[in-house]
Image: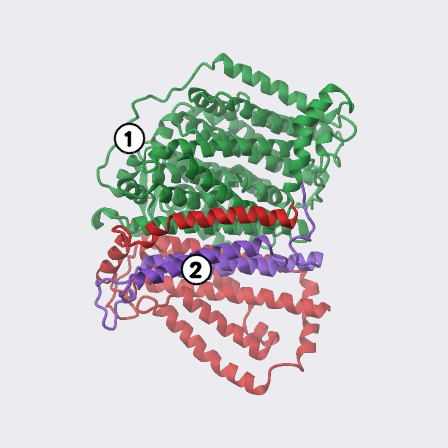
Chain colours: A red, B purple, C green
Amino acid sequence: MTPKWRLIVFFIGAAGIVCLFALVRAPVLRLNEFRNRYAQQINTRTFAERNVTDAVSAVNFDYRGFDTIGEEFILFVSVLGSLVLLRMAEERKDEILLDALDRKRDVGPSDATRLWILAMIAPKLVFGVYIVTHGQLTPGGGFQGGVILATAALILYLGEGFAVFRDVLSHTAIEVGEAAGAGAFVLIGMLAWFWRRPFLTNILPLGKSHELTSGGTMALISIATGLEVAAGFILLLYAFLQENLTIEGEE
Amino acid sequence: MGHAFSYAGYVTAIWLFLIGLYGVVTSRHLVHLCLSLTVLQASTYVLFTIIGFRPGLPAPIFTDGVTPGSPAVDPVVQALMLTDIVVEATVVALLLAITVRIHRRSGTTDPNQVDMMRG
Amino acid sequence: MQFAPLPVVIPLIVAAAMAAGSGFLHRRVLDLGALATSAAVLAITLHLTAVSSKGVIVYWFGGWQPVAYSHFPIGICFMIDPFGAGLASLVSLLVLAAFTFSWSYFESVKALYHTVMLVFLAAMCGLCLTGDLFNLFVWFELMTAAGVALCGYKSEESQPLQGALNFAVTNTIGAFTSLIGVGLLYSCTGSLNMAEVGATLSRGSSGHSFLIVGFLFLIAGFLVKSATVPFHFWLADAHAVAPTPVCILFSGVMVELGLYAIARIYWIVFAAASQPMMNAIRTLFLTVAVLTAILGALYCYGQRHLKRMLAFSTISHVGLMLLAFGLLDPTALAGGALYLLGHGMIKASLFIGAGILLHRFRSVDEYDLGRVNRQIIPIALMMIAGAWGLAGLPPFATYFGAEQFEHAAAEQHLTWLAGVIAFSEIMTSAAVLRFTGRALFNLGRGYSIASRGAPHIHMEVETHGKHSRVPAFMWLPMALLLLAAIFVTIPIRHSAAHYAAQFESAPVYESAVLGQNPSQFVPPQRPAVIHDESTSSTWWTRIVVVVGMFFFALLGIFPRRRNSVVSRALYRAIGYPLLRLRPLQSGRVGDYVAWMAFGIGAYGAVLLLLR
């Protein structure tokens, strides 16, 4: 189709979509009697049933934990797919990379930048671990904390370059970590199954509220998810940075 | 005021959806295409957030003065969206990896110029 | 009942374990592990099918039974009935066949192939068994991500990448449109559970326009997945380049799962509330089904690359299955389910045939092949059997299925639909016969007019090992699947209609899921009629199909001279439409997405105008 026809077809469709959206604006925006049912059930029962104060994490890791397993595996599969897509013949890769790294050694960030970045890595790691482990108490959890941990690796690259990045973070270890995080979530669910309860039931002791150990399996699931998300994003960084450097090296 | 806020959010969601779709349809660069997809994804986040909004109520974190069990904003919608945001970033990463390979292979990033299977 | 979550959980655990050990696990271990996992899932899903035939199984994850919460579902449930569990069994059977085909010869990068295939298996089983709308979306996204990873991983050429890109972009947009639909429904019903949403909609006072818009957005993603017109463009590109075991799954079950989701969503969530609009919905689905069937059949006949030909054939057959659903009748739905089972197995065996040809001759192009080889004759005969099955002829399950929904169409005074069904069956099987004749029996000379303009795609060899022989683990699944397509009818032919009637009655699922008034399923007043003796009209249709199939196949192999009457008539009926339609399948993702937007708008307009 010529570009003109493509636009015409699209605009007819878009006009239709706008009409459809406009038709339902009243039912969607008006607060009706049914909308709050789910929220009300969760909000009133979270603290009483699970001793946790963060209802959002409770929904993610307990009430609708099965959804989170699926989402986690979407991340897992996408990272795996990206890794394989960006692979190259192993022998060529290393030569070109080392070449490119050699050439980059003289040009890097200034010492002041490097100092600040190195100083920031530890607080970032601590903050990331804090967010991951306090998911059931305050806004946070595995997903958010995992991303923060991955950014610690990112600024390591920004400050020190890819050579140090590669030496500090072993590719195999992070791959294993990602798979372990994904598998751990499912295995925690299987714990309940082996105890003849439905999959993913929260069978660990619920602990005292406002403490790290509250929520039973939620804390463990949050840590497993944090490990998987962090490892996944670091692997993505690894793959894209390596590809980028290899392209530069070939030029 | 809550009503006006939701209305603005609804229009924003529609706009994001359509502009994301328009971006994909008329894109001439694959990275632009992937990011238009991101814009389209954002429309769902906005829509769900305004569906979960309750005027005047606090966040569903029952600490620091919010008594457990009291009415709060919808936590279900927020839970769905926060996992979605992180996960869809990796799906876009997968698409960008495909983009990088296409560029390596055929030297172009124009979706209209890539070696076609036509017919 | 304890076994309900296992079809999803077991493959996920094994996949994670394989990924963790991908650096050092030997190929044999991976192959064995994958085979064992898929066999185990097959056994469990068959068991679930048997158990659920006595009553719908509802499994609450995390133990969140709604009984304690004034019958409001606050957790996620699996809602297992014979249709869902049966489809999950087909999924695991085809995954088992795919792993058998790919035993040791198939090229895999570390453990990626096995890991992602197992996750794909888990996602498809999850989609079949779930009873929650957001859970449905999650498995749909996982299916798409795994499919893209599998489709594009042989990324040395640019064509696989183009196929993967088109697949990823169209399906992701579809998924997010479905998510918007979930959000719209949530805003008016406050729940994500299918049965609860259905109950609320039928009791509440949502207007007709809300129901139409919500329905349309929600099924948009599944329409894309099931490749209905005009959302179908991505399928041919993805199939032509995906590795063979992946194609088996795409055509055999992944596309059909989209249809299953549409049927499930319609009957449980919308049917009760949208009763007054049933005729409008029926008209829309029947129109779309007819368009899809005819378009798919035309494109199929005009291809020269076997995998792309089979992809278009899938589109056409999906049109027929959508027709079976669109009649909104239990007999038709039962026929459609039978047809789905038969078609899935036959299509899988044909794709295995394509994989064998690729392994043996490094090509699946009709004009590049052309060696008569004694060793290949059994394969060729199996492909002819497959074409016979695609044409809906006895003793394959497709015959029994097509018979049932043709009959339902006749009861609704829509006998002309039989003509559409016949056209689709004739053209798709004629294409496969023509391919077999020209490529494997070396008949015919010259180019058929239908192949003018067909894309000539370079295939990469996907297997290593000795290319001079066809090992048993390649042709054995092909033969076994064809046999299965014959024998699968025997246990289910007569009970299918009963379970179809149950599938269509939302109150059964509501009571099972929400636990309010547990009731056993009571069949509706009008008994679903099953015809043991085929009427003479069915026999006539079959004869027409057989004759037409061989006629078009021979016509394709031995083209007539330009000026004969036959040639000119055929050109007007088939050649000319193909000429005009081919540019639409342009390979450009922008075109595909423009058509998607147009499709949503058009469907909405049709429903709103007809209600």
Subunit of label 1: C
Rendered position, A58 above or below C604:
below
Mark 1, secondary structure of its residue? loop
Q: Amino acid at mark 2?
A: Thr
For the C terminus of chain B, the image quarter is: top right
Regarding residue C447, the answer to whether it shows in the image is: yes
Residue C587 image position (x, y, % from top left): 64, 46
- Within the image, what quadrant is residue C581 found in? top right
Query: From the viewer's perspective, is B15 left or right of C67?
Result: right
Residue count near mark 2 (Cα–Cα under 10 Å), binned few <14, some 14–19, many ≥20: some
Query: Mark 2, chain letter?
Result: B
Residue with the mark numbered 1: C521
- Name the residue at 48% across, 83% down: A119
Q: Say the numbered circle drawn on residue B18.
A: none
Closer-to-camera residue (C79/A15): A15
| Discs 1, 2: same chain | no
Image: C161 above or below C293: below
Which one is closest to the eye, mark 1 or mark 2? 2
> Looking at this view, is A124 or B17 the one in front?
B17
Residue C455 or residue A31, whichever sits in front: A31
Residue A49 visible here: no
Residue A14 locus on image (x, y percent)? 51, 49
Q: Where's residue C58, x and y in %?
A: 31, 42
What is the secondary structure assignment of the residue under circle 2? helix
Query: Which residue is disc 2 drawn over?
Result: B12
Left or right? Give the position of C339 relative to A85.
Answer: left
Q: Quadrant of the N terminus of chain B?
A: bottom left
> What is the C-alpha distance between the residues marked 1 and 2?
46 Å
Q: Are marks 1 and 2 in contact (CB under 8 Å)?
A: no
Q: Residue at x 52, y 46 (%)?
A: A13
Tell me which residue sits at (51%, 16%) in the image. Answer: C538
